[in-house]
Image: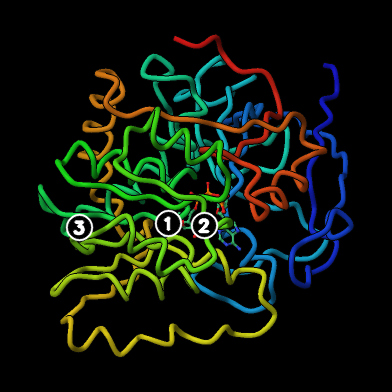
Amino acid sequence: MIEILSREIRLRRRPTGLPVEDDFELATVPMPELRAGEVLVRNSYMSVDPYMRGRMNAGRSYTPPFQIGEALTGGCVGQVAASQNDRFQAGDCVTSSWGWREYFVSDGRDLTRIDPGVAPIQAYLGVLGMPGLTAYIGLLDIGRLKAGETVFVSAAAGAVGAVACQIAKLKGCRVIGSAGSPAKVAWLLDEAGIDAAFNYREAADLTAELGRHCPQGIDVTFENVGGAHLEAALQHMNGYGRIAVCGMISQYNASAPAPGPRNLALVIGKRLTLQGFIVSDHADRRPQFSADMAQWLATGQIKWQETVIEGIARAPQALIGLFRGENIGKMLVKVGPSPAAP
Ligand SMILES: NC(=O)c1ccc[n+]([C@@H]2O[C@H](COP(=O)([O-])OP(=O)(O)OC[C@H]3O[C@@H](n4cnc5c(N)ncnc54)[C@H](OP(=O)(O)O)[C@@H]3O)[C@@H](O)[C@H]2O)c1
Protein backbone atom coordinates (compact mmCIF):
# COMPACT_ATOMS: atom_id res chain seq x y z
CA MET A 1 0.00 0.00 0.00
CA ILE A 2 1.25 3.52 -0.83
CA GLU A 3 2.19 5.55 2.23
CA ILE A 4 0.07 8.68 2.62
CA LEU A 5 1.81 11.75 3.99
CA SER A 6 -0.19 14.54 5.59
CA ARG A 7 0.99 18.07 6.21
CA GLU A 8 -0.21 19.81 9.36
CA ILE A 9 0.27 23.16 11.07
CA ARG A 10 1.63 23.12 14.61
CA LEU A 11 1.87 25.87 17.20
CA ARG A 12 5.59 26.62 17.58
CA ARG A 13 5.23 29.19 20.37
CA ARG A 14 2.47 31.26 21.94
CA PRO A 15 1.89 34.51 19.98
CA THR A 16 2.20 37.90 21.58
CA GLY A 17 -0.31 40.34 20.11
CA LEU A 18 -1.19 39.71 16.48
CA PRO A 19 0.25 36.27 15.53
CA VAL A 20 3.17 36.14 13.07
CA GLU A 21 4.02 33.27 10.74
CA ASP A 22 6.98 32.21 12.90
CA ASP A 23 4.52 31.29 15.67
CA PHE A 24 3.57 28.28 13.53
CA GLU A 25 5.39 25.43 11.80
CA LEU A 26 4.51 23.09 8.98
CA ALA A 27 5.19 19.40 9.63
CA THR A 28 4.66 16.25 7.59
CA VAL A 29 3.46 13.02 9.20
CA PRO A 30 2.74 9.58 7.71
CA MET A 31 -0.78 8.25 8.05
CA PRO A 32 -1.00 4.85 9.78
CA GLU A 33 -2.62 1.89 8.07
CA LEU A 34 -6.29 1.66 8.91
CA ARG A 35 -7.37 -0.84 11.56
CA ALA A 36 -10.84 -2.34 11.82
CA GLY A 37 -13.40 0.39 12.53
CA GLU A 38 -11.20 3.25 11.29
CA VAL A 39 -11.71 5.84 8.57
CA LEU A 40 -9.15 7.90 6.64
CA VAL A 41 -10.46 11.40 5.87
CA ARG A 42 -8.92 13.84 3.42
CA ASN A 43 -9.84 17.41 4.34
CA SER A 44 -11.10 19.73 1.62
CA TYR A 45 -11.43 22.98 3.59
CA MET A 46 -10.53 24.09 7.07
CA SER A 47 -12.26 26.86 8.93
CA VAL A 48 -10.36 29.89 10.23
CA ASP A 49 -12.09 31.39 13.27
CA PRO A 50 -11.38 34.25 15.68
CA TYR A 51 -11.72 32.01 18.78
CA MET A 52 -8.60 30.13 17.66
CA ARG A 53 -6.50 33.10 18.74
CA GLY A 54 -7.69 32.71 22.36
CA ARG A 55 -6.72 29.03 22.33
CA MET A 56 -3.15 30.02 21.42
CA ASN A 57 -2.76 31.69 24.83
CA ALA A 58 -1.86 29.69 27.92
CA GLY A 59 -4.69 29.12 30.37
CA ARG A 60 -8.17 27.83 29.89
CA SER A 61 -11.00 30.04 28.61
CA TYR A 62 -14.21 28.36 27.52
CA THR A 63 -12.08 26.03 25.41
CA PRO A 64 -8.76 24.46 26.45
CA PRO A 65 -5.53 25.99 25.07
CA PHE A 66 -3.64 24.56 22.09
CA GLN A 67 -0.41 22.82 23.11
CA ILE A 68 2.97 23.97 21.82
CA GLY A 69 4.44 21.51 19.33
CA GLU A 70 1.07 19.96 18.55
CA ALA A 71 -1.05 20.35 15.44
CA LEU A 72 -3.86 22.88 15.86
CA THR A 73 -7.48 21.76 15.60
CA GLY A 74 -10.66 23.40 14.32
CA GLY A 75 -13.63 22.90 12.06
CA CYS A 76 -13.10 21.25 8.69
CA VAL A 77 -14.95 19.44 5.90
CA GLY A 78 -13.61 16.64 3.78
CA GLN A 79 -14.26 13.29 2.20
CA VAL A 80 -13.69 9.76 3.37
CA ALA A 81 -10.68 8.48 1.40
CA ALA A 82 -10.75 4.91 2.76
CA SER A 83 -12.90 3.14 5.31
CA GLN A 84 -12.74 0.07 7.53
CA ASN A 85 -15.89 1.28 9.31
CA ASP A 86 -19.36 -0.01 8.37
CA ARG A 87 -20.92 3.43 8.88
CA PHE A 88 -18.76 5.24 6.30
CA GLN A 89 -17.87 4.65 2.68
CA ALA A 90 -15.15 6.21 0.53
CA GLY A 91 -16.54 9.45 -0.92
CA ASP A 92 -18.79 10.31 2.05
CA CYS A 93 -18.59 14.00 2.95
CA VAL A 94 -18.00 14.72 6.64
CA THR A 95 -17.32 17.55 9.06
CA SER A 96 -15.08 17.21 12.08
CA SER A 97 -12.84 19.26 14.33
CA TRP A 98 -9.59 17.90 12.77
CA GLY A 99 -8.69 21.02 10.78
CA TRP A 100 -5.16 22.42 10.24
CA ARG A 101 -4.10 19.15 8.52
CA GLU A 102 -4.60 17.43 5.19
CA TYR A 103 -5.57 13.92 6.36
CA PHE A 104 -6.55 12.23 9.60
CA VAL A 105 -7.63 8.83 10.87
CA SER A 106 -10.82 8.59 12.91
CA ASP A 107 -12.82 5.85 14.58
CA GLY A 108 -15.89 7.56 13.09
CA ARG A 109 -17.32 8.85 16.38
CA ASP A 110 -16.08 12.40 15.78
CA LEU A 111 -17.37 12.62 12.19
CA THR A 112 -20.68 14.11 11.09
CA ARG A 113 -21.92 13.14 7.65
CA ILE A 114 -23.13 16.09 5.56
CA ASP A 115 -25.29 16.32 2.47
CA PRO A 116 -23.30 17.82 -0.42
CA GLY A 117 -26.58 18.28 -2.29
CA VAL A 118 -27.71 21.22 -0.15
CA ALA A 119 -24.77 23.51 -0.92
CA PRO A 120 -21.04 23.25 -1.68
CA ILE A 121 -19.53 21.40 1.28
CA GLN A 122 -17.56 24.37 2.59
CA ALA A 123 -20.89 26.06 3.38
CA TYR A 124 -21.04 23.67 6.36
CA LEU A 125 -18.18 25.70 7.85
CA GLY A 126 -20.01 28.98 7.28
CA VAL A 127 -23.60 29.79 6.55
CA LEU A 128 -24.84 26.21 7.24
CA GLY A 129 -22.41 25.62 10.09
CA MET A 130 -21.19 27.11 13.34
CA PRO A 131 -21.08 30.78 12.18
CA GLY A 132 -24.60 30.54 10.74
CA LEU A 133 -25.95 28.97 13.92
CA THR A 134 -24.20 31.67 15.95
CA ALA A 135 -26.01 34.39 14.00
CA TYR A 136 -29.34 32.56 14.38
CA ILE A 137 -29.01 32.05 18.15
CA GLY A 138 -27.64 35.52 18.79
CA LEU A 139 -30.45 37.30 16.98
CA LEU A 140 -33.46 35.12 17.69
CA ASP A 141 -32.78 33.63 21.14
CA ILE A 142 -30.45 36.15 22.79
CA GLY A 143 -31.52 39.33 20.95
CA ARG A 144 -35.20 38.24 20.90
CA LEU A 145 -35.62 40.09 17.64
CA LYS A 146 -39.06 41.36 16.61
CA ALA A 147 -40.32 42.53 13.23
CA GLY A 148 -40.08 46.29 12.79
CA GLU A 149 -37.11 46.72 15.13
CA THR A 150 -33.79 48.35 14.26
CA VAL A 151 -30.75 46.06 14.43
CA PHE A 152 -27.06 47.02 14.43
CA VAL A 153 -24.45 44.40 13.48
CA SER A 154 -20.70 45.00 13.82
CA ALA A 155 -18.15 43.10 11.66
CA ALA A 156 -21.23 42.88 9.47
CA ALA A 157 -19.53 41.50 6.35
CA GLY A 158 -17.86 38.60 8.18
CA ALA A 159 -19.03 34.99 8.45
CA VAL A 160 -21.34 35.54 11.42
CA GLY A 161 -22.18 39.19 10.74
CA ALA A 162 -23.31 38.67 7.14
CA VAL A 163 -25.75 35.96 8.21
CA ALA A 164 -26.98 38.01 11.17
CA CYS A 165 -27.69 40.97 8.87
CA GLN A 166 -29.70 38.86 6.45
CA ILE A 167 -31.70 36.95 9.07
CA ALA A 168 -32.63 40.30 10.63
CA LYS A 169 -33.74 41.58 7.20
CA LEU A 170 -35.90 38.55 6.46
CA LYS A 171 -37.48 38.87 9.92
CA GLY A 172 -38.67 42.35 8.91
CA CYS A 173 -36.13 44.54 10.69
CA ARG A 174 -34.25 47.67 9.67
CA VAL A 175 -30.58 46.68 9.60
CA ILE A 176 -27.41 48.75 9.94
CA GLY A 177 -23.97 47.19 9.53
CA SER A 178 -20.44 48.39 10.12
CA ALA A 179 -17.47 46.93 8.27
CA GLY A 180 -13.86 47.76 7.52
CA SER A 181 -13.65 48.44 3.77
CA PRO A 182 -15.59 50.07 0.92
CA ALA A 183 -15.92 46.65 -0.79
CA LYS A 184 -17.53 45.20 2.34
CA VAL A 185 -19.92 48.12 2.65
CA ALA A 186 -20.88 47.74 -1.03
CA TRP A 187 -21.52 43.99 -0.54
CA LEU A 188 -23.73 44.66 2.48
CA LEU A 189 -25.83 47.21 0.63
CA ASP A 190 -25.94 45.64 -2.84
CA GLU A 191 -25.89 41.89 -2.14
CA ALA A 192 -27.04 41.40 1.44
CA GLY A 193 -29.62 44.18 0.92
CA ILE A 194 -29.36 45.82 4.33
CA ASP A 195 -30.64 49.35 4.91
CA ALA A 196 -27.45 51.18 5.89
CA ALA A 197 -23.78 50.33 6.14
CA PHE A 198 -20.65 52.31 6.89
CA ASN A 199 -16.86 51.86 6.91
CA TYR A 200 -15.85 52.35 10.54
CA ARG A 201 -12.20 52.84 9.57
CA GLU A 202 -13.17 56.09 7.82
CA ALA A 203 -15.40 57.37 10.65
CA ALA A 204 -13.77 60.16 12.60
CA ASP A 205 -16.33 59.66 15.38
CA LEU A 206 -17.85 56.17 15.44
CA THR A 207 -20.69 57.12 17.81
CA ALA A 208 -21.72 60.06 15.62
CA GLU A 209 -21.42 57.98 12.45
CA LEU A 210 -23.63 55.22 13.85
CA GLY A 211 -26.14 57.82 15.02
CA ARG A 212 -26.51 59.14 11.47
CA HIS A 213 -27.76 55.72 10.38
CA CYS A 214 -30.23 55.06 13.20
CA PRO A 215 -32.42 58.15 13.72
CA GLN A 216 -34.97 55.94 15.54
CA GLY A 217 -32.30 54.37 17.79
CA ILE A 218 -31.32 50.69 18.00
CA ASP A 219 -33.38 47.89 19.53
CA VAL A 220 -30.97 44.98 19.08
CA THR A 221 -27.19 45.13 18.76
CA PHE A 222 -25.36 42.03 17.50
CA GLU A 223 -21.90 42.74 18.88
CA ASN A 224 -18.92 41.11 17.17
CA VAL A 225 -16.22 43.72 17.78
CA GLY A 226 -16.47 45.35 21.23
CA GLY A 227 -14.48 48.43 22.29
CA ALA A 228 -15.49 51.60 20.47
CA HIS A 229 -18.23 49.71 18.62
CA LEU A 230 -19.93 48.68 21.85
CA GLU A 231 -19.59 52.19 23.24
CA ALA A 232 -21.23 53.62 20.10
CA ALA A 233 -24.05 51.06 20.26
CA LEU A 234 -24.76 51.74 23.95
CA GLN A 235 -25.16 55.42 23.16
CA HIS A 236 -27.90 54.76 20.61
CA MET A 237 -29.76 51.83 22.21
CA ASN A 238 -33.46 52.33 22.80
CA GLY A 239 -35.11 51.56 26.13
CA TYR A 240 -35.40 47.83 26.88
CA GLY A 241 -32.99 47.09 24.01
CA ARG A 242 -30.97 43.87 23.87
CA ILE A 243 -27.27 43.56 23.18
CA ALA A 244 -26.28 40.04 22.11
CA VAL A 245 -22.56 39.90 22.83
CA CYS A 246 -21.26 37.40 20.33
CA GLY A 247 -17.62 38.48 20.21
CA MET A 248 -15.15 41.27 20.85
CA ILE A 249 -12.57 40.67 18.15
CA SER A 250 -10.98 44.09 18.65
CA GLN A 251 -9.55 42.74 21.92
CA TYR A 252 -8.39 39.23 20.99
CA ASN A 253 -4.79 40.28 20.33
CA ALA A 254 -4.56 42.64 23.32
CA SER A 255 -1.86 41.77 25.83
CA ALA A 256 -3.73 43.41 28.74
CA PRO A 257 -7.47 43.66 29.42
CA ALA A 258 -9.00 46.62 27.58
CA PRO A 259 -11.04 49.17 29.60
CA GLY A 260 -14.80 48.69 29.47
CA PRO A 261 -17.11 51.03 27.60
CA ARG A 262 -17.02 54.46 29.31
CA ASN A 263 -20.79 54.76 28.99
CA LEU A 264 -21.74 51.37 30.45
CA ALA A 265 -23.93 53.09 33.03
CA LEU A 266 -26.41 53.69 30.19
CA VAL A 267 -27.61 50.10 30.67
CA ILE A 268 -29.38 51.25 33.86
CA GLY A 269 -31.54 54.10 32.63
CA LYS A 270 -32.22 52.40 29.31
CA ARG A 271 -33.08 49.10 31.05
CA LEU A 272 -30.84 47.23 28.61
CA THR A 273 -30.13 43.52 28.56
CA LEU A 274 -26.53 42.73 27.67
CA GLN A 275 -25.99 39.00 27.30
CA GLY A 276 -23.01 37.00 26.12
CA PHE A 277 -23.49 33.57 24.61
CA ILE A 278 -21.50 30.63 23.27
CA VAL A 279 -22.93 28.80 20.28
CA SER A 280 -21.92 25.35 21.53
CA ASP A 281 -24.42 25.69 24.40
CA HIS A 282 -27.23 25.75 21.84
CA ALA A 283 -26.76 22.47 19.97
CA ASP A 284 -30.44 21.66 20.58
CA ARG A 285 -31.34 24.45 18.13
CA ARG A 286 -29.31 22.98 15.28
CA PRO A 287 -32.12 20.93 13.64
CA GLN A 288 -34.43 23.95 13.43
CA PHE A 289 -31.58 26.17 12.27
CA SER A 290 -30.51 23.67 9.59
CA ALA A 291 -34.05 23.38 8.26
CA ASP A 292 -34.58 27.16 8.20
CA MET A 293 -31.19 27.87 6.65
CA ALA A 294 -31.54 25.21 3.94
CA GLN A 295 -34.82 26.85 2.97
CA TRP A 296 -33.41 30.39 3.03
CA LEU A 297 -30.51 29.28 0.82
CA ALA A 298 -32.83 27.47 -1.60
CA THR A 299 -35.04 30.55 -1.97
CA GLY A 300 -32.06 32.90 -2.26
CA GLN A 301 -33.09 34.85 0.85
CA ILE A 302 -29.63 34.38 2.31
CA LYS A 303 -26.50 34.94 0.26
CA TRP A 304 -23.04 33.97 1.35
CA GLN A 305 -19.51 34.94 0.59
CA GLU A 306 -16.23 33.21 1.25
CA THR A 307 -12.56 34.12 1.09
CA VAL A 308 -10.44 31.10 0.20
CA ILE A 309 -6.71 30.86 0.84
CA GLU A 310 -5.06 28.00 -1.07
CA GLY A 311 -2.95 25.36 0.63
CA ILE A 312 -2.33 24.17 4.18
CA ALA A 313 1.03 25.98 4.27
CA ARG A 314 -0.80 29.30 4.05
CA ALA A 315 -3.20 28.62 6.92
CA PRO A 316 -1.23 30.84 9.36
CA GLN A 317 -1.51 33.71 6.84
CA ALA A 318 -5.25 33.15 6.70
CA LEU A 319 -5.55 33.42 10.48
CA ILE A 320 -3.46 36.58 10.55
CA GLY A 321 -5.53 37.95 7.66
CA LEU A 322 -8.72 37.47 9.66
CA PHE A 323 -7.49 40.01 12.19
CA ARG A 324 -6.56 42.40 9.39
CA GLY A 325 -10.04 42.20 7.91
CA GLU A 326 -8.79 40.50 4.73
CA ASN A 327 -11.89 38.30 4.46
CA ILE A 328 -15.32 39.05 3.11
CA GLY A 329 -17.63 36.37 4.48
CA LYS A 330 -16.20 33.12 5.75
CA MET A 331 -12.40 32.74 5.90
CA LEU A 332 -11.41 29.28 4.63
CA VAL A 333 -8.27 27.44 3.68
CA LYS A 334 -8.55 24.94 0.83
CA VAL A 335 -6.39 22.01 1.80
CA GLY A 336 -7.50 19.34 -0.65
CA PRO A 337 -9.92 18.50 -3.45
CA SER A 338 -13.65 18.79 -2.87
CA PRO A 339 -16.62 17.17 -4.63
CA ALA A 340 -18.18 19.10 -7.49
CA ALA A 341 -20.73 21.70 -6.37
CA PRO A 342 -24.37 20.52 -6.51
N1 LIG B 1 -20.14 33.52 20.82
C1 LIG B 1 -19.92 32.55 19.95
O1 LIG B 1 -20.29 31.40 20.16
C2 LIG B 1 -19.21 32.88 18.68
C3 LIG B 1 -19.16 31.96 17.62
C4 LIG B 1 -18.54 32.34 16.42
C5 LIG B 1 -17.97 33.60 16.32
N2 LIG B 1 -18.03 34.44 17.38
C6 LIG B 1 -17.49 35.80 17.29
O2 LIG B 1 -18.15 36.44 16.22
C7 LIG B 1 -17.28 37.44 15.69
C8 LIG B 1 -17.17 37.25 14.18
O3 LIG B 1 -16.59 35.98 13.92
P1 LIG B 1 -16.48 35.44 12.43
O4 LIG B 1 -16.03 34.04 12.51
O5 LIG B 1 -17.71 35.78 11.71
O6 LIG B 1 -15.28 36.29 11.86
P2 LIG B 1 -15.37 37.30 10.63
O7 LIG B 1 -16.29 38.40 11.01
O8 LIG B 1 -15.64 36.53 9.40
O9 LIG B 1 -13.89 37.82 10.52
C9 LIG B 1 -13.38 38.69 11.45
C10 LIG B 1 -13.65 40.15 11.01
O10 LIG B 1 -13.57 40.95 12.16
C11 LIG B 1 -13.13 42.24 11.79
N3 LIG B 1 -12.02 42.63 12.67
C12 LIG B 1 -10.86 41.99 12.84
N4 LIG B 1 -10.08 42.66 13.72
C13 LIG B 1 -10.79 43.73 14.10
C14 LIG B 1 -10.54 44.80 14.99
N5 LIG B 1 -9.40 44.89 15.68
N6 LIG B 1 -11.48 45.74 15.14
C15 LIG B 1 -12.63 45.67 14.45
N7 LIG B 1 -12.92 44.66 13.60
C16 LIG B 1 -12.01 43.72 13.43
C17 LIG B 1 -12.66 42.17 10.35
O11 LIG B 1 -13.66 42.78 9.55
P3 LIG B 1 -13.63 44.36 9.23
O12 LIG B 1 -12.89 44.53 7.95
O13 LIG B 1 -15.06 44.68 9.13
O14 LIG B 1 -12.93 45.02 10.37
C18 LIG B 1 -12.60 40.69 10.07
O15 LIG B 1 -12.88 40.39 8.72
C19 LIG B 1 -15.96 37.31 16.43
O16 LIG B 1 -15.94 38.24 17.47
C20 LIG B 1 -16.02 35.91 16.97
O17 LIG B 1 -15.22 35.74 18.11
C21 LIG B 1 -18.64 34.11 18.54
- In this figure, which residue is indicated by the disc labeled 3? 141
Mark 3 and mark 1 lie on one chain; the one further toward the N terminus is 3
From the viewer's perspective, is residue 72 above or below residue 205? above
From the viewer's perspective, is residue 78 above or below residue 227? above
Instruction: Identify the residue at image location x=62%, y=31%.
Output: 45
Residue 271 spot, x, y in % from top left: 16, 82
C-beta proximity under 8 Å, tags 2 and 3: no
Q: Could you tell me how far apart the alpha carbons at marks 3 and 1 are, in whole angstroms?
A: 18 Å
Farthest left residue in view: 147
CB of mark 2 near ligand 1 (< 8 Å): yes
Instruction: Identify the residue at image location x=33%, y=46%.
Output: 164
Q: Could you tell me how far apart the alpha carbons at marks 2 and 3 are, in whole angstroms?
A: 27 Å
C-beta proximity under 8 Å, tags 1 and 2: yes
Q: Amino acid at mark 2?
A: Tyr
- In this figure, which residue is indicated by the disc labeled 2? 200
Mark 2: which secondary structure?
helix
Q: Could you tell me how far apart the alpha carbons at marks 1 and 2 are, in whole angstroms?
A: 9 Å
- Residue 40 visible, this orientation: no
- In this figure, which residue is indicated by the disc labeled 1? 154
Mark 2 and mark 3 lie on one chain; the one further toward the N terminus is 3
Q: Amino acid at mark 3?
A: Asp
Instruction: Identify the residue at image location x=82%, y=38%.
Output: 313
Residue 301 spot, x, y in % from top left: 26, 26
